């Protein structure tokens, strides 16, 4: 399959005529902010720890890649899954063999691969770089609220507290907001997501909930932490019934794998199905911080991703929701081109990320990595060519129907993987 | 010092306490109170040590036992600041047994506790030569031929200096490479010796210097003249950097006082002031924290109740404040939030987002607002129910319980006075009058919303007072520290 370089260049040329919604359409509830005709859900996958993009979307014909990674590089002959099926997707590019089920989605045109994504003056700290991606703020080193939290503040109403949900025990940077309720729903403790009664006096539960709700209705304008405790406490009480109804009433159309990621995706599917307001959902998986003995760890993680996504996609399709759900995968950076002495890779630079689901126009976007010595930075990392904020801007504009500038503070090119 | 300040001191330097403990501190000058909490080696912990031994004899769960052991320490100790500092360092030198083979992380915990108030250099070196960290950050794979930067980077980013100082980076990528090289050959090996959590075991892990894997080439860090540096040199050099003093002050303040913003000139002056204490006192952690806890900043409005309790502080604090009883052998067993799902204290903390000995990553836990997610708050609410639903010693397990007799000690003849009494016990908390009125009405209302006469008798204590304690534990104000 040819790459989409030409297409990209055209798109970049067309930035200035991109559709920008007037601000008056924002902030007045989801129905107004989201484009008419169909629901628009975004599921975000965070690959925590720095995913090795070069061993995810593999430039197997690149001699620099082969030479710099004596034990970790995949040769074309190795790009086959356990059943002997090739995971090569073009003359020069293959997917990691563990992504075999994900490749089925790619072959159906439902995966957009964006290559060499990053940002200027990349920070090599996991935590700062995660914050930078989360807040979409390289200039401010990741300070401020999250880009999807800001989107939620602009466009998503209160509902029953389930318009923005993270399947984690704490709210990730990306979803931190100024006023919207973001529900953290830890899959491990979801059975306890609801207020329990003293078993000796179960009849007191409604009295307890009433008082707790009244106490949590206080606002604390000068004390943001107490205000958050009240807002989230009230939201939790409101959301807990809906969560259990969603989960208990849900019948998955497939058997999900038993991995934590797949378990989280099944809950995501139940929420999307049962809660009409559910719009932004977030899962995380890792650790991709493969400094040593990378091959097995990376293969295991990508297998979990590939098989989890495959089940999730099939399930969504069976519920007639596959057209309504866009998925975005990101990681805070890639890994160094040259492997280290411990069959692993240290913190790297630009990386490939995936946008997938029925809404995307599948294919490869962006130039292949340039791994020649002179093209690498002083640390030996490949240099970004597409700013990650352009990916966000494309999603905001063409999927969520929001003004990218209102969220990102600046204009970025439309990469063209949507609409 | 007044009662409110003494309670604040005990919450921050410990986990909060009972009125008699707070009154004992309040009888001292602020300096003497801090001194008493700092000099914890003098505390008599015989009862706790006996309980810890019994706990170790009773169990063999390599993941659960060390967590129960630490919770029991935090709840029983007469030296609460020792445990609080250990918690600080566990978060600072975050290491997780989700990756590291057991029992290295609990073993590291002993080192953190032993050196909690040492010269920083000594603790830093001990942790870099501790098998848990060497394993966690892959340094056993860091060799002469190919350096692995994982430990070298975090040595500077997370353990000592942080990324940037005022306006400039504290180190470069070349420094990361040089420090990684200096640490080559630092690995782990099996050594003879028993282990506190498994005394019968004959072998454990220890530090090993593999000279053949050490890169003894000349290295330069921070623009200093090149030399054959190894890990001990790196510890010495980094510990003496002003950036390290500043970074530690910022972390100590964020954990014990309030977060500082080094882009603010006023805060910048605070950072410099306490960093100077570190430099002037031979990097003594004890003197830095002494200066912090005796500073007026510690008792300022910006500090009082402006931190959020971490899950461990929430749980241990409630158990201590309410004078919960438990069998000597330990905490856990039958403790449950639901009858179907027995849960131990450490599991309750994990449900709130803080699985002790397994921080989410090497940067530790996110504090403050991060504790207040919906799942975490519900876990707190349900812990209040779990703690209050246990009325007597559980014959099948070891759950802490608060008896009606214990609760009766804090009851007053009227509903309003009883609410005031419990708000004082559990803080003292300052709560707006509307909320006080709602809590009072709760005591005067039956399950059907019918008015009832408040009489602090046993049935009322068993029902309404337990409900009142639950509701106070759920108040936003009680989440604050």
Image: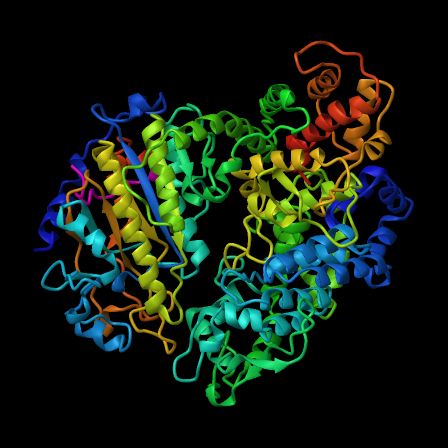
Q: Is residue B72 left or right of residue B271?
A: right
Pick whichever, A399 or B73, lies toward us: B73
Write down the region rendered in magenta: A407-419
Residue B141 visible in the picture: yes
Seen from the viewer's position, the closer of residues A130 and A1 is A1
Q: Relative to residue B163, is residue A398 depicted above or below?
A: above
Q: Is residue A215 above or below residue B35?
A: above
Q: Give the percent coordinates (x, y) of residue A293.
A: 38, 72
Q: Nearer the viewer, residue B367 or A214?
A: A214
Q: How is the image coloured?
A: rainbow
Looking at the image, which residue is at 35% across and 70% down? A379
Viewport quadrant of the C terminus of chain B: top right
Pinpoint residue B95: horizontal percent, then vertical percent.
55, 62
Looking at this view, name the residue that lies furthest to the right: B27
Q: How many marks?
A: 0
Q: Is residue A138 visible?
A: no
Q: Work out which quarter of the rendered image holds the N terminus of chain B and state it.
A: top right
Q: Residue at x 60, y 69 (%)?
A: B241
Q: Position of residue B109 (x, y in %)?
A: 65, 64
Q: Nearer the viewer, residue B338 or A375?
A: B338
Q: Residue at x 67, y 16 (%)?
A: B447
Q: Quadrant of residue A242?
A: top left
> Based on the displayed image, in which of its 4 quarters is residue B131 positioned?
bottom right
Residue that sits furthest to the top in the current view: B450
């Amino acid at each position: 399959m040819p790459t989409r370089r030409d297409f990209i260049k055209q798109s970049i040329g067309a930035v200035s005529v991109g559709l920008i919604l007037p601000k008056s359409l924002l902030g007045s509830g989801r129905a107004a902010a989201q484009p008419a005709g169909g629901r628009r859900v975004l599921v975000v996958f965070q690959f925590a720890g720095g995913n090795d993009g070069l061993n995810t979307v593999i430039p197997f014909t690149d001699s620099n890649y082969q030479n710099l990674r004596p034990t970790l590089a995949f040769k074309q002959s190795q790009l086959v899954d356990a059943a002997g099926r090739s995971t090569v997707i073009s003359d020069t590019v293959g997917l990691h063999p563990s992504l075999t089920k994900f490749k089925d989605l790619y072959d159906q045109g439902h995966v957009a691969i964006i290559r060499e994504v990053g940002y200027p003056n990349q920070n090599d700290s996991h935590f700062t770089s995660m914050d930078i991606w989360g807040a979409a703020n390289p200039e401010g080193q990741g300070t401020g609220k999250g880009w999807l939290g800001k989107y939620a503040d602009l466009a998503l109403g209160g509902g029953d507290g389930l318009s923005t949900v993270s399947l984690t025990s704490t709210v990730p940077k990306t979803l931190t907001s100024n006023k919207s309720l973001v529900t953290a729903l830890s899959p491990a403790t979801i059975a306890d997501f609801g207020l329990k009664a003293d078993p000796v006096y179960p009849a007191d539960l409604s009295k307890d909930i009433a008082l707790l709700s009244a106490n949590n209705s206080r606002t604390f304008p000068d004390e943001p932490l107490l205000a958050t405790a009240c807002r989230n406490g009230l939201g939790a009480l409101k959301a807990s019934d809906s969560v259990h109804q969603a989960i208990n009433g849900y019948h998955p159309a497939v058997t999900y794998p038993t991995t934590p990621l797949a378990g989280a995706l099944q809950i995501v599917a139940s929420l999307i199905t049962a809660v009409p307001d559910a719009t932004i959902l977030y899962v995380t998986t890792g650790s991709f911080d493969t400094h040593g003995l990378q091959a097995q760890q990376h293969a295991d993680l990508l297998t979990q991703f590939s098989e989890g996504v495959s089940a999730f996609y099939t399930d969504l399709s069976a519920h007639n929701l596959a057209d309504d759900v866009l998925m975005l995968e990101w990681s805070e950076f890639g890994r160094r081109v040259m492997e280290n002495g411990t069959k692993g890779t240290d913190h790297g630079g630009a990386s490939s990320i995936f946008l997938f689901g029925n809404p995307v126009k599948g294919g490869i976007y962006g130039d292949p990595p340039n791994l020649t010595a002179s093209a690498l930075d002083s640390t030996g990392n490949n240099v970004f060519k597409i700013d990650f904020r352009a990916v966000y801007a494309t999603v905001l504009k063409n999927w969520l129907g929001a003004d990218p500038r209102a969220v990102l503070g600046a204009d970025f090119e439309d990469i063209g993987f949507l609409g | 010092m007044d009662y409110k300040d003494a309670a604040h001191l005990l919450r921050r330097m410990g986990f909060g306490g009972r009125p008699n403990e707070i009154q004992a501190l309040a009888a001292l000058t602020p300096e003497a109170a801090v001194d008493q909490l700092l000099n914890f080696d003098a505390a008599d912990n015989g009862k706790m040590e006996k309980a810890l031994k019994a706990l170790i004899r009773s169990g063999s769960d390599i993941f659960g036992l060390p967590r129960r052991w630490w919770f029991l320490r935090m709840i029983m100790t007469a030296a609460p600041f020792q445990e609080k500092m250990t918690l600080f360092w566990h978060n600072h030198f975050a290491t997780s047994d989700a990756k590291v083979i057991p029992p290295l992380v609990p073993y590291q915990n002993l080192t953190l506790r032993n050196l909690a108030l040492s010269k920083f250099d000594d603790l830093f070196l001990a942790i870099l030569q501790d098998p848990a960290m060497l394993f966690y950050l892959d340094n056993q794979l860091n060799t002469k031929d190919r350096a692995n930067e994982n430990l070298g980077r975090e040595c500077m980013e997370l353990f000592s200096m942080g990324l940037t100082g005022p306006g400039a980076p504290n180190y470069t990528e070349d420094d990361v490479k040089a420090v990684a090289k200096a640490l080559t050959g630092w690995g782990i090996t099996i050594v003879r010796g028993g282990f506190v959590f498994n005394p019968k075991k004959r072998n454990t892990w220890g530090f090993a210097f593999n000279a053949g894997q050490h890169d003894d080439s000349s290295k330069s860090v921070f623009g200093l003249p090149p030399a054959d540096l190894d890990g001990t040199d790196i510890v010495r050099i980094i510990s003496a950097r002003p950036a390290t003093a500043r970074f530690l002050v910022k972390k100590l303040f964020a954990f014990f006082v309030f977060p500082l913003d080094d882009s603010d000139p006023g805060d910048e002056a605070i950072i410099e002031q306490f960093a100077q204490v570190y430099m002037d006192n031979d990097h003594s952690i004890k003197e830095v924290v002494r200066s912090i806890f005796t500073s007026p900043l510690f008792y300022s409005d910006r500090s009082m109740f402006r931190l959020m309790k971490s899950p461990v502080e929430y749980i241990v604090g409630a158990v201590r404040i309410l004078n919960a009883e438990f069998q000597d052998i330990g905490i856990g067993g039958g403790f449950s939030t639901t009858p179907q799902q027995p849960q131990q204290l450490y599991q309750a903390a994990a449900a709130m987002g803080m699985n002790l000995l397994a921080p989410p990553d090497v940067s530790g836990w996110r504090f403050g607002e991060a504790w207040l997610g919906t799942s975490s708050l519900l876990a707190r609410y349900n812990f209040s129910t779990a703690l209050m639903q246990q009325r007597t010693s559980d014959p099948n397990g070891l759950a802490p319980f608060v008896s009606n007799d214990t609760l009766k000690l804090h009851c007053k003849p009227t509903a309003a006075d009883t609410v005031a009494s419990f708000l004082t016990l559990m803080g003292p908390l300052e709560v707006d009058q509307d909320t006080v009125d709602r809590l009072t009405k709760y005591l005067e209302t039956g399950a059907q919303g019918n008015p009832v006469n408040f009489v602090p008798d046993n049935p009322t204590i068993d029902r309404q007072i337990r409900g009142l304690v639950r509701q106070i534990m759920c108040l936003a104000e009680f989440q604050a520290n």
